[in-house]
């Protein structure tokens, strides 16, 4: 197997692009992140972690671990707030034309806004960001001596090692996704994570591994449909939790929100499973080879 051209330089460039994207998002934040900014920040952190995992054994095994862990820890610190943001949006949107259930949905959304997890404190956020920036600096330094940034050339041994590692990890990700099969509700989120990591890996390899490119739209579709079903599952859990802490009358009113949400979850699961079947049918015939 011949290594793809300039894979080490591709890694360094992708790392630089992800750091620039993160810095641009952080520059827009003046307080606790929320809404689409929070969503975009978490996506950026996932992409950083995925790149660090995929290419993390160059120049030596485990070189990307610190960056992967730092990005993961910051994303997890922001996850609860994002879950509650999505739940409020679903509550307000789903029942806005339902005059009977809308007042109850609005009260629950207000409770979520008032009682919800505020996210990491400013001090915690600074600490997590500092760790992430240090990890970025170390990772960039570890790659800097492997290639000539002007020509994009690198030592042949490092190119071959990295090419072999990336291909092996993409094959493993595809195998794990196939082994998961068409997921039920309980396995949907795990399958979505597998699809997301494979997609990010294929987006990184780009035309250097052209055959799997047709998978990317199918992976994106499954991510979207599985994400919609997962959001509804989390909303159902939140409604049940809030109803359990309410007075009797409020609890009954809150529980009346569940039938339409449960029906929507069932429909969303069916869409995700149909998407999964299309993806798995295509995945079984794909070869992961460098051009």
Image (cartoon, rainbow, N blue to C red):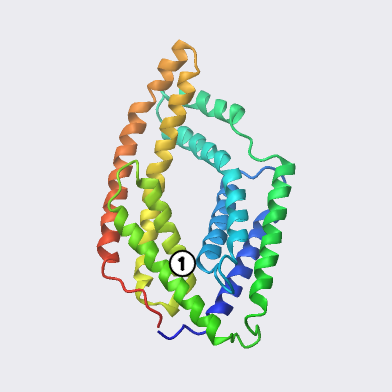
| Viewer-side residue, 262 vs 290 | 290
Q: Is residue 278 left or right of residue 176?
A: left
Give x and y (percent) for residue 200: 47, 64
Identify the residue at horizontal 39%, vertical 21% (top origin). Answer: 255
Give the residue furthest to the front: 61
The quarter of the displayed image where residue 141 is located: bottom right
Q: Up-down: is 163 above or below 283?
A: below
Q: Residue sitting at 46 percent across and 69 percent down? A: 203
Q: Residue at x 33, y 43 (%)?
A: 268
Horizontal relation, residue 233 to residue 129: left or right: left
Identify the image quadrant of the C terminus.
bottom left
Q: Position of residue 33 (x, y in %)?
A: 64, 45
The answer to which quarter of the image holds residue 229 is: top left
Residue 43 pos. (x, y %): 54, 55
| Number of numbered discs on residues | 1
Q: Is residue 50 above or below residue 157?
A: above
Which one is nearer the viewer's eye here, 18 or 175? 175
Spot occupied by residue 11 in the image (x, y as percentages of width and height): 56, 73
Please tell me whether mark 1 sits on a helix, a strand or a loop: helix
Label 1 crowd bin: few (<14), some (14–19), many (20+), radius 10 Å: many
Nearer to us in this view, 65 or 70: 65
Quadrant in which the N terminus appears: bottom left
Q: Is residue 5 visible?
A: yes
The residue drawn where x is 61% and y is 74% is: 12
Q: Is residue 100 visible?
A: no
The residue that mark 1 highlights is: 201
């Amino acid at each position: 197997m011949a290594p793809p051209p300039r894979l080490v330089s591709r890694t360094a460039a992708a790392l630089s692009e992800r750091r620039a994207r993160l810095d641009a998002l952080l520059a827009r934040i003046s307080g606790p992140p929320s809404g689409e900014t929070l969503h975009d920040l978490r996506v950026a952190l996932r992409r950083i972690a995925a790149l660090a995992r995929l290419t993390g054994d160059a120049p030596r095994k485990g070189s990307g671990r610190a960056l992967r862990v730092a990005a993961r820890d910051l994303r997890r610190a922001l996850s609860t707030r994002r879950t509650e943001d999505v739940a409020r949006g679903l509550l307000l949107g789903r029942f806005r034309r339902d005059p009977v259930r809308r007042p109850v949905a609005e009260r629950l959304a207000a409770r979520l806004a008032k009682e919800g997890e505020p996210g990491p404190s400013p001090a915690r956020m600074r600490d997590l960001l500092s760790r992430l920036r240090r990890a970025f600096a170390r990772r960039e330094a570890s790659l800097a001596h492997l290639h000539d940034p002007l020509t994009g050339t690198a030592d042949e041994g490092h190119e071959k090692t990295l090419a072999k590692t990336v291909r092996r990890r993409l094959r493993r990700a595809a195998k794990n996704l196939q082994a998961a099969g068409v997921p039920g509700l309980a396995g949907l989120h795990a399958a979505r994570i597998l699809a997301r990591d494979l997609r990010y890996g294929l987006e990184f390899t780009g035309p250097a591994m052209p055959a799997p490119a047709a998978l990317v739209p199918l992976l994106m579709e499954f991510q979207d449909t599985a994400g919609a079903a997962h959001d509804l599952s989390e909303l159902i859990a939140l409604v049940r939790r809030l109803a359990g802490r309410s007075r009797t009358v409020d609890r009954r009113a809150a529980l009346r929100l569940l039938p339409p949400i449960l029906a929507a979850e069932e429909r969303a699961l069916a869409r995700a499973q149909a998407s999964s079947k299309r993806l798995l049918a295509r995945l079984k015939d794909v070869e992961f080879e460098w051009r």
